[in-house]
Amino acid sequence: MRRIMSLLLMTTCCASMMLAQDVESWVSEMLTQYPKARILDIYKSCFQDYMGAEHLVGDTASARAYLEQELETTALDELMPWYYEPCGINGNYVRVSLRAVMEGKVQAEKLLDAFVRSANDPERPTIETWKETWHEIVAVIDKMGLELAHQQEDMAFIEGVLAQRKYAISHSPDYREAYSPHYRIIKQEIFENEFKPLLSEPSCTQ
């Protein structure tokens, strides 16, 4: 019995260490790729990985109109060079850049359809479980000793959002100015089956 308990304890400790290593590695890679990123942007990528899109999409017509407007007002040379990148630590969702549409790799309607299906996934986790997960990530980030711009202010803002039982936030102004993020969130399974064969290069595989 003691042997079984010891093995269980070792397994739990190893799992925690693996989580910490994964978080630290991913955060370091993200900040290398996006040195202007703030805690807000780390948080956003992580909640997209865990929760998917920021809200359910009930009005497809409005979502289509917004996508069309974004395509019309976005300059290709403003965008990062990649067609897609995984969200967060586990890549459960993928950001597909509007570059893929603007360069003719993917039809706008196809991207919209995949986005709506992904956003309306019935298996969306609860905000409470996400809050617990984020606090585990924060514990690792704290140990990394990062000194990012507006770090304490951003942490407090995120806690305020979570206290209201909300989770979605926007990219930081610094990130938007430096990287002009224009993308749609697609569930990883949908991306692998329907998009990845069309988007072999370029990609961001952080």
Image: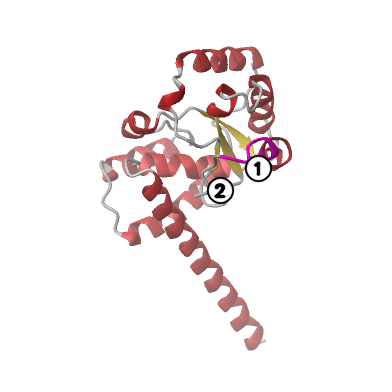
* Amino acid at circle 2: Thr
Residue 93 in magenta stretch? no
Task: Measuring from the top left, give residue 195's x and y in whole percent.
Answer: 68, 35
Describe the element under mark 1 as helix, strand or loop. helix
* Disc marking residue 188: 1
Q: Where is residue 91 in the image (x, y as percent from the top left)?
A: 58, 47
Q: Which of these two is toward me, 132 or 202?
A: 202
Please, what secondary structure does the residue beneath circle 2 have? Answer: helix
- Horizontally, residue 197 falls left or right of residue 52, namely right
Of circles 2 and 1, the one toward us is: 1
Q: Which residue is drawn at 26% across and 51% down?
A: 147
- State which quarter of the image contains the N terminus: bottom right
**CA–CA distance between discs 2 and 1?**
20 Å
Left or right position of 78 against 86: left
Sequence-first disc among 2 and 1: 2
Residue at position x 37%, y 30% from top? 176
Circle 2 residues within 10 Å: few <14, some 14–19, many ≥20: few
- Looking at the picture, the colour scheme in use is secondary structure
* 96, 151: nearer the viewer: 96
* Dot label at residue 129: 2
Image position of 26 with respect to 193: above or below: below
Q: Is residue 126 visible?
A: no
Coordinates of residue 97 in the picture (x, y in percent): 54, 31
- Which segment is the magenta one? 196-201
- Viewer-nearest residue: 39 or 97: 97
Q: In this view, does 178 lie above or below 66?
A: below
Q: Quadrant of residue 122?
A: top right
